[in-house]
Structure formats: structure tokens, C-alpha cells
Amino acid sequence: MLAAVLVAVVLIVVAIRLSEAPPQINPQSLLVVDLDGSIVERPPVEVPFFEEKTPLTTFELWRALHEARSDTRIKAVLLMPGNLNAGWGKLEELRSAVAGLAGTAKPVYAFLRSPSGRQYYLATAAQRIFMPPEDLLDLKGLRVELMFFRGTLDKLGVKVEIEHAGKYKDYGDMFTRTSMSPETREVLNSVLDEIYAQLLGAIAEGRKKSVAEARAIVDRGPFLARQALKEGLVDGLRYEDQVIEELKKSVPRLKRVSIRNYIRATAEVRKRGRTRLALVVGEGAIISSEGAGLDGGLAAQEFIKLLRQVGEDGGIRGVIVRVDSPGGESFASDEIWREMNILSKRKPLVISMSDEAASGGYYISMTGDPIVAYPATYTGSIGVVYGKANLRGLYEKLGISKDTLTRGRFAAIDSDYEPLDEAARRKLREGVDDNYRVFVEKVAAARQRKFEEIEPLAQGRVWLGSQAKRNGLVDELGGLDRALELLRQRAGIPRGEQVSIEVYPTRRSLLERLLSRQVRARLPEPLGAFLGRWPTEALGRGGFFRLVPFRLDVR
């Protein structure tokens, strides 16, 4: 009965949407790039009547901003970044696209409300930057904070038991320590240095200052609006309507069109190119089957079906695989790796890394094809970890006990009630070490290097894309532009030939979403965001993981 009602609702909504005319673009249009909330890679479900809350994808924004460059109806652009939830890789993609617009004859302005360093980084690509006269520019540098749960787990009577290969593979530290290890501190200091240099470089370039001047200015932040103006970080203090009036002085009779409506309008009239290319998106923690994670994750079997579908489509000339994953289950990663290599033999292939393609996300990228990463992409983390939770202390606090019977020496090795003895730990260590050796061997083969050259770069260490490029772990620095350029070269497609890029997977229907087992949206946002990164069900039962060691959010 419920399913029938849901189907009826969906059909009614679809009928209404089909009867709607696509948005019209005025010949004197001001494109308002009003960005707020999450920017994702995989097309999300679009809930009718709530489209304004549906996250936009990196590809949608990239394509729209590129089309706006040559669209004669778009006379000016106003960038208005809000509370963006995007990593430094996606921000680099957007900043590059805005810079491309700013390099045309069109005026490109940015209007900021209470901006943080991220929003300001993006705005530095605009020709002019404005903010309200009574506001704050929260530009004060960067910081990294890691959360540790050892004290909480001790109080609960929970012990997490970890075995790992690679001295930097410190995923379990959040459960077993109360502070950073020396190895973690070394890596994160190098990460901060690289991202901070990129931020200062963007400020220096955008505001016509030296890097030393930019560094000195940031050290004086944060800034009230008038202070930001005095420091030369903004060009004027205006309210939104005043910024638009200023644009109209250069381009009269401007009519606003939001980036969402522009995407919808151009999608309706876009002609399919003679040459078809595929953009296959792998986003989220790698899991063995759909529904095993709170956000669906990068489900191996589902993703493998997509890769096969693309590989068997004779009309598709080449493929970009867009990876945005912290890794996940070890054996699921290996299955995806196998199918990626099969696809590589059937089609020209390029790997495009988003905010992160680390551990299992890096593993599945080992096809030997070109890898393009942003300077701030989290990648590498070539290592393996085994983890399981021992809940015996918690059970005892709750008055719960278990009585266990076994047959077989290691029958209780993954029990949540029994600790690991030395023999069990040695058994697991064998598996971890073997997984690690295979990982390094596959990286060495794909990168055409010797095992002895790759192993010192492995050890579970996370690298930024800029560092990975210097170490030969990725081939190019860049985003979708560079990935597409490389794919054209590999597929023999002339630069001027029109192409149609088809995204896989396509958007899911509302009915599919309503009937799925996903529950992440019901959780408080911080908890949902945290748990959504990890293959939580697999972690609970114990297993081998190619998983990035920490959730890193540089602010």
C-alpha cells in the first residue's frame, strides 16, 4: 500500500515537472553563482519542490561555468559563496573555473557575507571583491584538529584492537591514543605547509601582492570589513543591491539568473556531441555491497556494474573515472581494481582525483593510466589496517555477559567479546603484511617503478597531490579540464571536436531514495558526516581495510 502511494506521488510530481517550461535566459543576464552547502561528485536524488536544497555536483558547476564563458547571453557574473562544505580540491576546481570567466571580457565580481578563508580563497579569482560594511572577514590562517576517543572508550569499557602495516598508517590512533603520534604530526605539518602556501599564493595573485605581503596580512587577521578594505583584501564595502547596481553601470538592464536555473536551462537545450565520453563517479567509503554504509558509500558491486556498462557501450570513446574516496574495505577495493583494469584495456581512460583518493581510493586508481590530482588532493596512504572493537567492558557495565563455545583455533578471532591473544595477533599480522605487500606491488606495477622505490613512499603516509606529483605517485596537477584534455589525446579526438560527457551513475529517483536503507540523513549533521566516511558495519565486525588514517578538515 505504501509503495503504491509513493509511486502515485512520484508520477504526479514527474507529470508536473514535465509540464514546466525550462528556465529562460535573458540576453542581458547576470549569472549569480550562489553556492551554499555541500558540493558533491555523485549526482544526488533530486526531491521535487526542494531542488534549491539539492547539492550541486562539481561536474555540473564546472560545465556551467565553462559554458558561460562563450554564452553571449551571460554579460556579467556575481560569485556569492556561502557556507561551503567542500574540500580544497573542489575549491581549486571552482576557483580555476571562475578565473577562466574573469579572463574574458565579462565583469566577474564576488560578494561575500561573513566569509571564512575558504570563501575568500575562492573569491580571489574574481576581478573585484565586495562585502557589507558591517561584517567580518574571518581570514586568519589554517588549522588542523584531530579528535581522539581513547578517554571516552576507556570510560565505556571498549577497547579497539588494531594491527597495521606502515608506520604512518595511524587510522586506529583515534581509538587507541589521546594525542597525535610523531608520525601524524610530521604528516599534518607538511599538509598545512602546502595548503597554506597555496592559500597565500592565491591571495598574492588575486590581490596583486607579494607572498610575503600576503603572509603578513593573514597574520593580522581576522578583519572587520573596514580593516579588510584598508588591507586591500576587498575593493569596496557594499550591500548586495549596491554591487548589482555597480555591475549595471558597466552592463545596463541586467537580469539575474541563478546558477541552478542556468544549469537547468542549458541542460534542456544542450545538443549531444558527435563524440560521447563518460564520467564515472566513485564517491564515498568503499564497501562490499550497497546499503552497507550509512550513506551508501562506494558499493563495489554497484560500481562494477557501472564500469561494465560503460565498457560494453561501443559508442563511448573514452572514460574519466572521478575518484573521491578515503578508501574502505580491502577486498572490495581489490574487486573494483580488477574491473578498472578491465575497463582500461577496452577504453582510453584517465583518473581524475577530487578532494581525496587515498588508501583504497588510490588502490582502485592503479590501472597504469594517467592520474590527475589537485595540489590539495589527499592521496597515497598506501597501507593496510585491521581493526575490531572489543566490547566486553561495555557489556559488563550493562550487565551483559556472553558464554562462548568454539571449534577451530581462531574461531573467535573477530569476536567482540574476546581480546586478541598473541597467536591471533600474529595470524592477523600475516594478513595485514600480505595485503600491504600486494598493495605496494600493484602501485609499483601501475607506476612502472620498482617495489624498492615505492615502499618508502608507502608506509600508510598521506600525501597531498602536489607532494604526490613530486614523488611520482600521480602524473599531473589539475582538474577536469586537464583530465578531459588528456582523454582527448588518448582517444584521438581533435581539440575542436564537440563532445558529449555523460555522467554515471545518473540521478536516482525519489522512489529509489525513499525505499533505500540509508539512514544517515536522520542523524545529527556532525555525526552523520563523521560516520558517513567509514564502512561502519564492516568496522564493527572486524576486517582488513585500505582506509585513510584520519578525517582531515583544514580550516
Image (cartoon, helix red, strand yellow):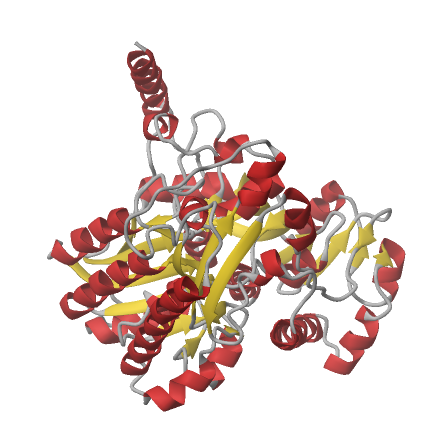
Q: Nearer the viewer, residue 553 or 509?
A: 553
Figure check: 473 above or below 403:
below
Figure check: 279 above or below 540:
below
Figure check: 526 above or below 219:
above
What residue is shown at x 59% (from left), y 38% (from top)?
396
Q: Residue furthest top?
A: 1
Q: Nearer the viewer, residue 309 or 234?
A: 309
Figure check: 39 above or below 555:
above
What residue is shown at x 62% (from left), y 45% (from top)?
157
Q: Nearer the viewer, residue 123 or 411?
A: 411
Q: Position of residue 334 (x, y in %)?
A: 28, 63
* Residue 269 falls left or right of residue 171: left
Give residue 188's quadrant in the image. bottom right
* Residue 456 falls left or right of residue 529: left
Q: Nearer the viewer, residue 321 or 120?
A: 321
Q: Position of residue 125 (x, y in %)?
A: 62, 65
